[in-house]
Amino acid sequence: MIYIQTLLNVADNSGAQKVLCINILGHNRKFGLIGDNIRVSIKKTKPTKNFKKGEVMDATIVRTKKVITRNNGFSFSFFENSVIIFKIVNKNFVPSFTRILGTIPKELKKNSRCTKLLSLADNLI
């Protein structure tokens, strides 16, 4: 589960490395799960990329340490909490990356932003 003020890793090649969750979007819950949209502040970047420290972006949670159980009884979890970052262009969410690093779960199909994600990912669980 991702709460406000949680430090997260970035699972794409956009240039940001660490981000801080500042808001959970679209729910009255105080936590976010896989597939939820959040607003993040960039805390650490690669030196050659366009992002700046402190910039506010939108992101989608793709991995959490919390155990996920499917309807068929299969359960799994990840070793880290990770997100992917989106840019907002003309009120549309555009991916700011060309590749996703690591494995992502199939539960992301429920999120409308993530239709292109499944083809960019290395592995699906």
Image (tube, rainbow, N blue to C red):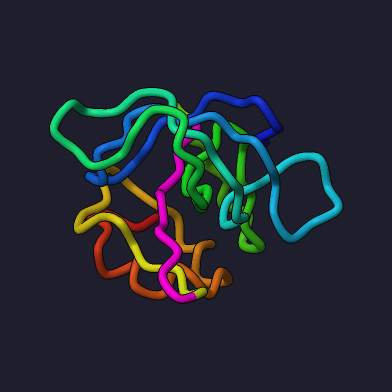
> Along the horizontal axis of the image, is 66 left or right of 113?
right
Residue under the image location 45 percent in, 76 percent down = 90
In the rendering, at what x and y percent does residue 43 appear? 43, 24
Residue under the image location 23 percent in, 42 percent down = 50
Please tell me in which quadrant of the rendered image residue 36 appears.
Answer: bottom right
Q: In the displayed structure, would residue 123 be above or below residue 18?
A: below
Question: Magenta stretch?
Answer: 81-90
Please tell me in which quadrant of the rendered image residue 124 appears.
Answer: bottom left
Of the pair 41 and 11, the residue shown nearer to us:
41
> Along the horizontal axis of the image, is 38 left or right of 117?
right
Quadrant that contains the C terminus = bottom left
In the rendering, at what x and y percent does residue 116 appear? 34, 72
Residue found at the very far right of the displayed protein:
28
Of the pair 46 and 106, the residue shown nearer to us:
46
Please tell me in which quadrant of the rendered image residue 44 appears.
Answer: top left
Of the pair 98 and 49, the residue shown nearer to us:
49
> Along the horizontal axis of the image, is 26 left or right of 106?
right
Does residue 125 show up magenta in the picture? no
Quadrant that contains the N terminus = top right
- Predominant SS of the magenta segment: strand
In the rendering, at what x and y percent does residue 68 appear? 61, 46
In the rendering, at what x and y percent does residue 30 appear? 81, 40
Q: In the displayed structure, would residue 36 be above or below residue 31?
A: below
Residue under the image location 41 percent in, 50 percent down = 85
